[in-house]
Every structure is written in structure tokens, then in C-alpha cells.
Image: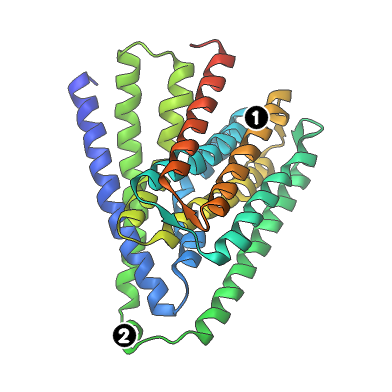
Amino acid sequence: MNLFWAVTLLVAGVAILWKCADVLVAGAVGLARKFGVSPVVIGLTIVAMGTSAPEVAASIAAGLRNMGETALGNVYGSNIANLALVGGLSAVLTPLTVARRTLCREIPVMLVVALLLWPLLQDLCISRLEAAGMLLVFGLLILITIRLAHAESRTAEISEEDRGRPLGRNVVFVLLGLAGLAVGADLALRGAVYIGARVGLSQAVIGLTIVAVGTSLPELATSFVAALRGHHDISIGNLVGSNIFNTLLVTGAAGVVRPLAIGSRLAGPDFWIMIAITVLFAVAAVIGRRVLTRPAGLILLLAYAAFMVYAVALTGAV
């Protein structure tokens, strides 16, 4: 590959991401209207699970290679990037309204789920049994979400126009959107990594910056487009749902494949940084009276920049 093709891949990848995110959001909104459920439910489940696919694949691959720190580090990095980078950029783009149910229910669940990791990390290893327990909790949360969505749809008034919307078309839109996000993210990441290497960045810096952002590109594109289209529930639901999935599904799946042995840094300071970012995101929504304002978005971005400086400095790769 040369520089021309790297730039071409980067531009093409971003273009595909943008278009497919638009298709995904359209399909998700269509499904929500068809079944009479809040768009945040679709964002928390279908959209969040789909955009978390890169993290699932990366962590399972790391687990198979006995790279426990890489698997769990991917979860931490993705969770921090989702809330601080993606959430911050989306809020700077347009202030995001947070649904009352999301602030009172899903965001606290996201924080509690993250804190559940703490006792599991004390022996510097997540065993297969502990990982299986995380998958069980994940399954229970999905079941509860589906039951609540079913109850919501039974009491919702669905217009004749929404009732007549073709289900197949919206499902195809969601599937095509998710597939396109994966392709676009891969192309953009390949091009960006090559460009980073050409300008002299070390592998450590590339991994902590370009690759970290690359695995969050599906969430970034989806939340950006949803915010631009005024579908704030999908934008926020995607971020919160992705973090819940990352913590439970990604960590659980990787740990079931092989027990995750980790170092003291992931069990200590890195864990608490992830918790601090999660709390900052929640506090920003509360202070803004259920709105993530532009100033809050800037604070989240500054927090992400500070985390990147900390991470790079500790590798000695500055």
C-alpha cells in the first residue's frame, strides 16, 4: 500500500460509515415506530449490539491468544471513548436531550454493571465461572429490556401509518447499516494506521489513538447521524447500551474462551478512570437537566484528551 491508497481507503471508509449510519438510524426509527416502542429501546439493544461487534471480535481474538490485558483494555478503552469522545463530540455538534427513563434507569445500570467488575479484578484474573456469570447477567438484562419493550408496545397508540410500515424494509435497513459500518470502519482504520506509521507514530501511540478510535467508529458515526437527525434517544441509547454490552458481553465472552489474566494497572487506576468518566457523563446529564450541553461535551472531550495523554505517557511512547 502507498500513501495515495491509504488516503483513498480513509476517505472511502468515512463516506461508507456516514451513509450506512444514516441507513441504520432510518431502519431503527422505523422499527421503533412499527412496534410502538421508544427509539431508546432500539438504540439500547439492536443498534448498540451491532455497533459493539468490533469490540466483541477484538476481545475474543485477544482471549484466544492469551492476551487478557488486551481483551480487558479494549473494553476500558471503548467504554471511555464512547462516553467521552463520541458523547462529547455529539453534544458539541448538537445538545443531546436525555430521556428521563434513560437518566433514571439505563445510565445507573451502566454504572452498576461497570462496578460489578471491581470484585472480579481483585485476584488479577477473571475466571471462566466469573465470565459465565457476566454473560448470565447480560442475558437477564436483555430479557428485562424485551419484556419492558413488550409492555410499552401494548400500551402505545400506533398510528395506521406506522402500523402499515413494511417490517422487512426496516430490518434490511438495519442489517445493511450494521454491515456497512463494519466495512467502513475497517477501511478507515486500515488507511489511518498506514498514514500514522508513515508520519512516524510509534505502534504504541497508534494503538492507543488511531486503533482505539477506530473500534469506536461505528458508535461515533451512528450517534453523530442520529444526533443530526434529531433522534437523540437512539444516539444516547447507542452509547449507553454499547457500554453495558462491552462490560458484560465482551468481557464475558472473552473470559469464557480463556480466563483473563491482567496486571495491577487494569485492576486499579485504569478501572477507576473508566468509572470516573461514566460518573462524569451521568453528572453532565443531571446538571444539564437531562440535556448534554455543548459545554458538557467540551468537558468530556477534555477528559478524553487527558486520558490519552496519561495512557501514552505511561507507555513511555510520547
* Element assignment for label 2: loop
- Whether 125 is drawn above or below 179: the answer is above
Query: How far from the left and from the top, in percent, is residue 102?
Result: 56, 62
* Element assignment for label 1: helix
Gap between marks 2 and 1, in whole Å? 49 Å
Identify residue for label 2: 164
Query: How far from the left and from the top, in percent, is residue 127?
Result: 76, 40
Name the residue nearer the viewer: 247 or 86: 86
Count of numbered labels shown in the rendering: 2
Q: Quadrant of residue 211?
A: top left
Residue shown at 23% from the left, 43% from the top: 15
Q: Label 1 crowding class (10 Å Cα cut-off): few <14, some 14-19, many 20+?
A: some
- Whether 124 is drawn above or below 113: the answer is above
CB contact under 8 Å: marks 2 and 1: no
Label drawn at residue 270 = 1
Q: Quadrant of residue 298?
A: top left
Quick one: quadrant of the N terminus?
A: top left
Report the amino acid beneath label 1: Asp
Work out whether residue 38 can be spotted: yes
Left or right position of 263 against 123: left
Label 2 or label 1, whichever lies nearer to me, is 1
Residue shown at 43% from the left, 21% from the top: 206
Left or right position of 297 against 67: left
Report the amino acid beneath label 2: Gly
Label drawn at residue 99 = none
- Whether 128 is drawn above or below 238: the answer is above
Residue shown at 49% from the left, 48% from the top: 52
Left or right position of 189 against 125: left
Query: How far from the left and from the top, in percent, is residue 73?
Result: 59, 32
- Whether 263 is drawn above or below 172: the answer is above
Query: How far from the left and from the top, in percent, is residue 130?
Result: 76, 46
**Residue most extreme to the bottom:** 160
